[in-house]
């Protein structure tokens, strides 16, 4: 009797344990279902951004659009940057400007020089390079080394995609246009099991990827994995760039240098009647400090001399 009671007790414990395990699993599934991957949102843009296409095409073999288009969707929806087009849109705009300069547009069209918004930053999306022969699972190995045979470098670049395990390792590189300093190189990772976080009201809900040119990213498994990997990297990048100057990249950067266009002089005070610091020959390069007094600009030269020059004697360096 004691043995039967013990067996029944053990059986009851097992049932309770199974019920607890099932309840825990259900709870975990509910928690997962409530979570969705979200594009980060910013209260105001931190600068003007141009997105460039990677140098090597790894996406065509996967029947996907360029990752440039995918990142532009993130940028537009996040509001973290003001986006400028340096691709097809710019080419079309240049054609309009050519029509304007040729006198072919209607009067009052107001299209001309000095109107294009300057980019503060350039962002390049790419794949993390891995050894194509390391596992046999990445895109180069998965299709029999086809990419590697046709283009060994392309096969290596695509090493961040694993077809068999449906994983992706991507990278975003953002560069300051004025200083050319790389502000961040951020890696993102995603796998097949992460796709559930992007459904519903998340990334893949009404994303508009296809209309933006990012075809294949929301309706193929590997496309969704790559999307979430780029989203992971973009979210990290936005967090890292939270300390960008509030006054804007242009104001925070060093002042553009100027070049003397006629024989001139540098004065100790903002007046041509002031003490002479040094004569200036044509071609001399000066660095404005930002201080101005009428037509007089405060400058420094390459030898460390400091003084004032008339703005009518120099041009902005190209």
Image: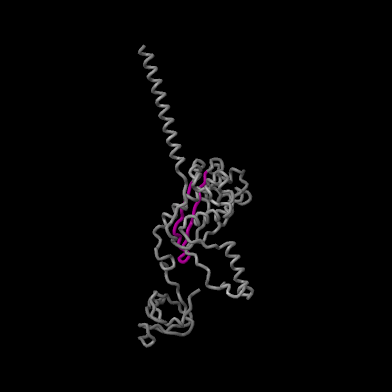
Residue 117 horizontal/vertical position (percent):
51, 67
Quarter of the image containing the N terminus?
top left
Q: Is residue 182 part of the magenta span, yes or no? A: yes
Q: Residue at x 42, y 31 (%)?
A: 23
Question: In this view, which residue lies farthest toward the top?
Answer: 1
Residue 126's place in the image compared with 179, above or below, is: above
Residue 179 visible in this rendered orientation of the protein: yes
Nearer to me, 287 or 295? 295
**Quick check: can you spot residue 136?**
no
In the rendered image, the vertical position of residue 219 relative to residue 78, given as above or below: above
Q: Position of residue 212 (x, y in %)?
A: 57, 55
| Drawn side of residue 192 relative to residue 243, left or right | right
Q: Position of residue 66 (x, y in %)?
A: 57, 54
Q: Which residues are magenta?
A: 167-189
Most frequent secondary structure within the magenta stretch: strand
- 102 vs 225, nearest the viewer: 102
Instruction: Please identify the residue farthest to the bottom as the structure is shown.
Output: 273
């Amino acid at each position: 009797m004691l043995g039967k009671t013990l067996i029944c007790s053990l059986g009851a414990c097992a049932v309770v344990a199974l019920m607890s395990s099932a309840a825990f699993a259900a709870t975990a599934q509910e928690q997962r279902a409530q979570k969705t991957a979200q594009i980060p949102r910013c209260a105001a843009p931190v600068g003007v951004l141009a997105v460039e296409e990677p140098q090597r095409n790894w996406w065509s073999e996967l029947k996907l659009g360029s990752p440039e288009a995918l990142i532009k969707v993130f940028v537009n929806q996040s509001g973290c940057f003001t986006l400028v087009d340096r691709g097809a849109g710019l080419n079309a705009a240049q054609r309009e400007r050519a029509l304007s300069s040729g006198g072919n547009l209607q009067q009052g069209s107001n299209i001309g020089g000095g109107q294009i918004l300057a980019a503060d930053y350039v962002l390049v999306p790419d794949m993390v390079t891995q050894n194509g022969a390391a596992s046999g699972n990445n895109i180069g190995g998965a299709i029999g080394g086809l990419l590697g045979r046709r283009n060994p470098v392309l096969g290596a670049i695509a090493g961040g995609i694993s077809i068999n395990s449906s994983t992706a390792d991507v990278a975003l590189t953002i560069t300051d246009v004025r200083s050319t300093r790389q502000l961040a190189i951020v890696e993102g990772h995603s796998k097949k099991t992460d796709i559930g976080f992007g459904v519903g009201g998340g990334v893949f809900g009404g994303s508009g990827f296809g209309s933006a040119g990012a075809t294949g990213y929301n309706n193929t498994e590997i496309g969704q994995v790559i999307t979430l990997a780029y989203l992971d990297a973009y979210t990290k990048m936005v967090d890292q760039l939270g300390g960008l100057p509030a006054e804007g990249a242009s104001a925070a950067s060093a002042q553009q240098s100027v070049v003397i266009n006629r024989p001139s002089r540098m004065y100790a005070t903002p007046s041509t009647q002031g003490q002479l610091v040094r004569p200036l020959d044509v071609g001399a390069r000066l660095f404005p400090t930002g201080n101005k007094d009428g037509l007089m600009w405060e400058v420094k030269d390459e030898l460390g001399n400091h003084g004032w020059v008339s703005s009518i004697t120099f041009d902005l360096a190209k």
